[in-house]
Image (tube, rainbow, N blue to C red):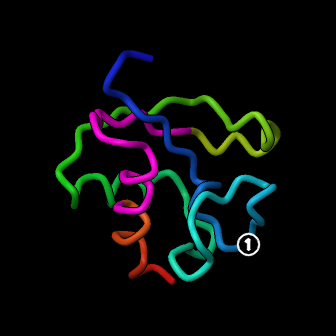
């Protein structure tokens, strides 16, 4: 991963997961069962360049959800919150 990139996994935004299981946003910002396509759509709305990779979150290795690598210079938590806000319409 190059500098200026952030890795995002669908589990970061999943309302069905606890923080220990990998959720990174509050439950009121989380979505019900987000998938990789939802993250892509949210990043497109934000105008953030990204690429999709077929890697999985280490805690969820059997799910093979994939991940998105976004070009982002700011803090990762800021990007996660912005993506979560764009996912809100899918609740």
Circle 1: is it few (<14), some (14-19), or many (20+) Cα within 10 Å? Answer: some
Q: Residue furthest top?
A: 2
Residue that numbered label 1 is attached to:
16
Is residue 29 shown left or right of residue 87? right
Which residue lies at the image location 30% right of the left edge and 40% below the top edge? Answer: 74
| Residue 35: image location, x then y, percent | 55, 58
Q: Please tell me whether residue 83 belongs to the stretch shown in magenta.
A: no
Residue lying at 45% horizontally and 51% vertically, measured from the top left: 77
Q: Quadrant of residue 64?
A: top right
Whether residue 82 is situated above or below residue 85 in the rendered picture: above
53 w.r.t. 78: above or below: above
Quadrant housing residue 27: bottom right
Farthest residue toward the left? 47
The spot of residue 75 in percent (x, y) is 37, 42
- The quarter of the picture where the N terminus appears is top left
Residue 74 falls left or right of residue 19: left
- The residue depicted at 82 percent of the width and 40 percent of the height is 62
Examine the rendered structure and indicate whether residue 17 appears above or below residue 40. below
Q: Position of residue 81 (x, y in %)?
A: 42, 62
Where residue 29 sits: x, y (%)?
Answer: 51, 76
Q: Specify whether residue 68 is painted magenta.
A: yes
Residue extent of the magenta highlight: 67-82
Query: What element does badge 1 sit on?
Result: loop
Residue at 67 percent across and 35 percent down: it is: 56
Query: On screen, 83 above or below 5?
Result: below
Report the side of 78 relative to 29 (left or right). left
């Amino acid at each position: 991963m190059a500098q200026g990139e952030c890795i995002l996994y669908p589990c970061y935004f999943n309302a069905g997961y606890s923080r220990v299981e990998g959720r990174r946003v509050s439950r009121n910002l989380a979505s019900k069962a987000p998938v990789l396509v939802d993250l892509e759509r949210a990043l497109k709305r934000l105008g953030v360049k990204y690429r999709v990779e077929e890697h999985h979150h280490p805690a969820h290795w059997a799910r093979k959800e994939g991940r998105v690598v976004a070009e982002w210079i700011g803090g990762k938590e800021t990007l996660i919150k912005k993506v979560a806000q764009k996912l809100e319409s899918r609740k």
